[in-house]
Amino acid sequence: MQTTLAHEQHAQRQRDYFATAVRPGMLPEATPYILRHVGQLLAQAGIAPGSSVLDIGCGMGRFSFLLAERGFRVESLDVSPFMIDRLREFDGGRYGIRAWCADLAHPPAELLGRFDAVVGFFMLHHFVELDPVFPAVERLLRPGGRAAFVEPNPYNPLYYLQVLSRPDMKWAAEKGMLNLRRGKVFGHMRSAGLQSPTLDRYGFLPPFLRNTKWGGPVERVLESVPGLGPVLPFQIFTARKPAR
């Protein structure tokens, strides 16, 4: 697919940004906070056990490994060679995940039409524009396959405070969250030929609170408070490729 100069420049900035050091916030781990995202995505998307799954924007494999542990046949894709190398190191042959280094807008031909599900965790908002994303996802899916993405909710004000307060976060890399509104994402999904888009919002507590023994029950109560649904911090977009 033809991409714009803005996309190519942004992709290079992403490679540069993730090419210098292992960032603690991206290390593979299985905390209650991380497990909640995996469980929520699988439940919302209805991905069947044993499905072939491509984890795009996989980073160092945090979510790829957890999907593999649940019995999914996982492959991973990321634009950063540094991240792909770290994923292979952390894998160490445990899961045998095949990892691909490529821009999602230009996926390897070997991957096209192969997957029951294409998933991403906190990666859509790193795209400066969504135009190339969903056509690529559609091409990667088998007929009847599912797409599902966990992302920040742009209507939650705490994200903007987080970006302002953390020196390791740059607005240039995070501002794509402004694109992640229901109408805009659904429009891109439908234009790419994906059907039945859905949006679900969830969560409440930051990691250091969610990972306590009482974090889960408290979060469930807070999620149910009337009126908070539109500003809950996380959202999952799903859609499916038509079956032939």
Image: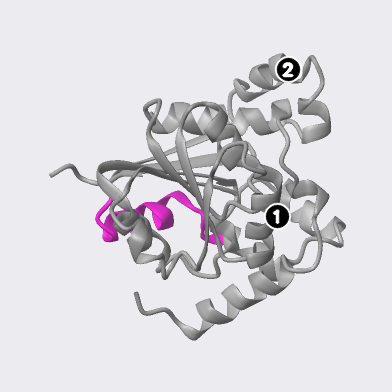
Q: State the separation of the CA atoms marked 1 and 2.
A: 35 Å
Query: Is residue 121 found left or right of 146 in the rendered image?
Result: right
Residue type for callout 2:
Val
> From this viewpoint, which residue is outermost toward the left?
244
Please say if 138 is above or below 1.
Answer: above
Instruction: Tell me where residue 86 appears, x and y as whole percent.
Output: 70, 55
Q: Quadrant of the N terminus?
A: bottom left
Labelled pair 1, 2 in contact (Cβ < 8 Å): no
> From this viewpoint, which residue is outermost toward the front?
93
The residue located at (51%, 77%) in the rendering is 7
The residue located at (31%, 49%) in the rendering is 114
Q: Quadrant of the C terminus?
A: top left
Q: Earlier in the sequence, mark 1 or mark 2?
A: 1
Residue type for callout 1:
Arg
The residue located at (28%, 60%) in the rendering is 191
* Colouring style: one colour
* Of residues 70 and 210, the one drawn nearer to the viewer in this rendering: 70
Q: Residues within 10 Å of mark 2 (few under 14, many from 20)?
A: some
Query: Is residue 209 found left or right of 74 in the rendered image?
Result: right
The disc label shown at residue 58, or none: none
Q: What stretch of residues is rendered in magenta?
A: 178-194
**Residue 234 in sight in this render:** no
* Of residues 155 and 28, the one drawn nearer to the viewer in this rendering: 28
Give SS at disc 2. helix
The residue located at (63%, 46%) in the rendering is 61
Q: Main secondary structure of the magenta part?
A: helix
Residue at mark 2: 218
Please say if 225 is above or below 10.
Answer: above
Residue 105 sits in which quadrant? bottom left
The disc label shown at residue 86, or none: 1
